[in-house]
Amino acid sequence: MIENVTCLAGGVGAAKLLQGLINVMPQENLTVIVNVGDDIELHGLHISPDPDIIMYTLASIVDEEKGWGIQGDTFNFVSMLKQYGLETWFKLGDKDLATHVYRTCLIKEGVPLSGVIQRLCRALGLKVNLLPVTNQKIVPQILTNTGKMHFEEYLVKRGARDRVLDVTFEGAELARPAPGVIKSIQDADGIIVCPSNPIVSIGPILAVKEVRSALTETSAKVVAISPIVGGSTIKGPADKLMRGLGLDVSAFSVASLYRDFLDTFILDNIDEKMKENIAKLGIEPIATDTIMKSLQDKVNLATRTLQALL
Ligand code: FO1
């Protein structure tokens, strides 16, 4: 019987699966370990994209079309910043701004990121247990042909146009798992690696001390869903990052990255032919429809994933 489920999650792709999961299981039994490697300080504010995307999505206030930010939000703040000649490449909506201001105030008062996320979740009526993988900084540095930069600068400011040469995680050695993270892996009846960017979303989570070993040691089944379908990403730059690191851009390549702790890998029907090679890694392959457009798609994939945990 699968009661307590722990997920490893990044941003948009993970949020869609989680939306399906909370429709088929109690939120109280769902723990989400979320990437904080996209976090960035802009305009003196602590911005935390992946936790915010998950919270807004589960609270049904996310801008569905973009996958981030708050639906119907206005952008008066950034247009006034522009008038002052400040950089506005990262579009902060006016309602979204409240989240960054509140988070920054709490952090200034000494509240750890885990406490901030807990307060935001409760205020948004969420019962899911959302944990940052660490309360410290772990910042992916994208080394490109034009220099080293923050992931958001690479993706948003420069439109992922630079050639990726390497990705490193600044602060990984010192980053400790946030309270409850390791325990949520050890106590889980099942673990899901969401369809997120394996390099800069799941990568930073796995880079935090003890997380990877907890995943290899747990008796619970670990199931991942491929973020790569038919050799490309649904959204985001995972394909460019993988190619830059000399990795094949394929479902098989993602399964190989997780092979030391993975039991089952869910890939899209379009990649059915990869099942045999994935099985040779000692991982059970499951082919299904993994494209999540409608809520029903999300519920179907969530249901299929929970079945795979049995
Ligand atoms: N992505 C963009 O492509 N452009 C933006 O202006 C932008 C603003 C933004 C503001 C808040 C937030 O939580 C996310 C935002 N994102 C934006 C998404 C973000 O860059 C990435 O999608 C995630 O970091 C990937 O997980």
Image (spheres, helix red, strand yellow):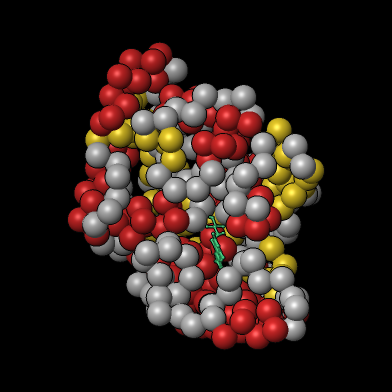
Question: Where residue 293 appears, x then y in whole percent?
Answer: 28, 54
Quarter, ligand 1: bottom right
Which is more toward the observer, 102 or 97?
97
Q: Is residue 296 left or right of residue 123?
A: left
Q: Is residue 246 left or right of residue 260?
A: right
- Residue at the spot 58% in from the left edge and 71% down from the top edge: 91
Q: Is residue 222 left or right of residue 304?
A: right
- Does residue 192 appear in the picture of this structure? no
Q: Is residue 154 left or right of residue 75?
A: right
- Does residue 288 appear in the picture of this structure? yes
Question: Where residue 13 appears, x then y in whole percent?
Answer: 42, 51
Which is more toward the observer, 298 or 228?
228
Question: Where residue 94 appears, x then y in whole percent?
Answer: 54, 83
Which is more toward the observer, 21 or 234?
234
Q: Quadrant of residue 169?
A: top right
Which is more toward the observer, 302 or 38?
38
Does 14 sit above or below residue 309?
below
Does 245 sit above or below residue 35?
above
- Residue at the spot 65% in from the left edge and 58% down from the top edge: 157
- Residue at the spot 49% in from the left edge and 29% down from the top edge: 249
